[in-house]
Image (tube, rainbow, N blue to C red):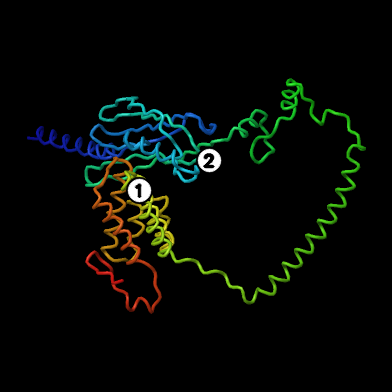
Amino acid sequence: MRHIRDIIVSIVALLGTMAPAAATAQVPTLRGYFSQDSVEVGDVVEYVIEIEKDRATEIGIPDFDTSTPEQRRATAAAKRTMSTYEEYDEDIFELVEEMPFDTLAVEGRTLRLRKRYRLAVMETGTIPMRPAILYFDKNRETPDTLYAPDTLRLHVASYAELDTMLFLKADPTSQQGFGVDDDKATSMLKDEGITTQKDMPFIFAEISDYVTYGAIALIILALVAWAVVWIVARELKRRKSIVKPKPAIPPHIVAVKALEELANRKLWQNGKYKLYYSSLTSILKVYIVGRWGVGALEMTTDEIMVALQGIEMPNDSRANLIAILRTADMVKFAKAQPEAEENEENYTRAYYFVENTKLETTQHNETKREITFETKIEE
């Protein structure tokens, strides 16, 4: 009997040590990086995501091209009819090639995977990107977004900016950490048969007239500037007592106007589901920031709902917000294409969420009633 009891105790202890490991293995980890940290506009860069996950865990990966061949042909035809480039809404990245998953390692139930995309960069400047995947937790009915710990930044330079980089050198004394190598620039110019001004003999007579006229011009400009400053200061002082700062536009008015503009764009009606739900959730997140001061723009769906737990609002409004954010996650990461009725219903939910949670004066609060799907809005 004692031998049997020892075996049972050993089995229970083994199961106890295995359970936490199995639980933690279900949550994937990821990191992402670009093949280069700086490129020229129009260049192709490789974007890589490395994922470590359990064999049974399901994930959704980013999709940089959700359009069908018919939609791409229609977009190309629409661009040819545009009078100006600004009328067409281009994305920052254009998908060139999507490679299949690579299996980097297999350790028991844990898989290390790599997903690669070749993207053409269509804008200049510093482009931030936080790697993310869709995570399907077995204990949840709907997926959530899982982000990498660090935000990537890709510097996209214009042609002229890249040309000047030929003359850069390390400079510890500079705030940027680099400076211009004058000797290298001069040497390269001489190789092209060009003599720089600093290598020519200086003759003061060549600039004497410019010095005289320049001094006169500076005196005149200084007098004009002093007169302008004096007149402006006197006018501002006179108006200081009557000019009042323009009141800030309430966040619910900004949100309602943005929702109206979104409806007029007819995005989902033209197959742009991802852009439609990105715009819809952005409007709501900006409204949440202005209404309650919650930094929703950088939060996931679950983080937003946790941040709003201590804020009083109607239960219907909280449920409407969750439904919109969950649908947007499915469209963004699982390539879902909701039916027309669901798209219209989510738009209505967004409008009711803003109307039922907006900040009003005491006088208005006395007569305010909650708006629901059954409410008749009288014109």
Q: Is there any visible trace of residue 214 in the rendered image?
A: yes
| Residue located at (34% from left, 25% from top) | 102
Q: Position of residue 67 (x, y in %)?
A: 33, 37
* Amino acid beneath label 2: Thr
* Amino acid beneath label 1: Leu
Point out the tag, 1 or 2, that comes first from the N-terminus: 2
Q: Position of residue 109 (x, y in %)?
A: 25, 30
Of residues 329 and 375, the one drawn nearer to the viewer in this rendering: 375
| Residue located at (41% from left, 63% from top) | 292
Q: In this view, does 52 lie to the left or right of 88?
A: left
**Does 124 sit above or below residue 255?**
above
State the residue lying farthest toward the right. 205
Q: Name the residue under label 2.
A: 126
Of residues 161 and 193, the one drawn nearer to the viewer in this rendering: 193
Image quarter in which the N terminus is found: top left
Image quarter in which the C terminus is found: bottom left
Q: Is there any visible trace of residue 29 in the rendered image?
A: no
Q: In which quarter of the image is residue 260?
A: bottom left
| Residue located at (90% from left, 37% from top) | 206
**Does 75 sit above or below residue 98?**
below
Of residues 117 and 234, the one drawn nearer to the viewer in this rendering: 234
Per the model, the C-alpha gap separating discs 1 and 2 is 28 Å
Q: Mark 1 points at which residue?
A: 267
Which mark, by number, is residue 312? none
| Residue located at (42% from left, 50% from top) | 298
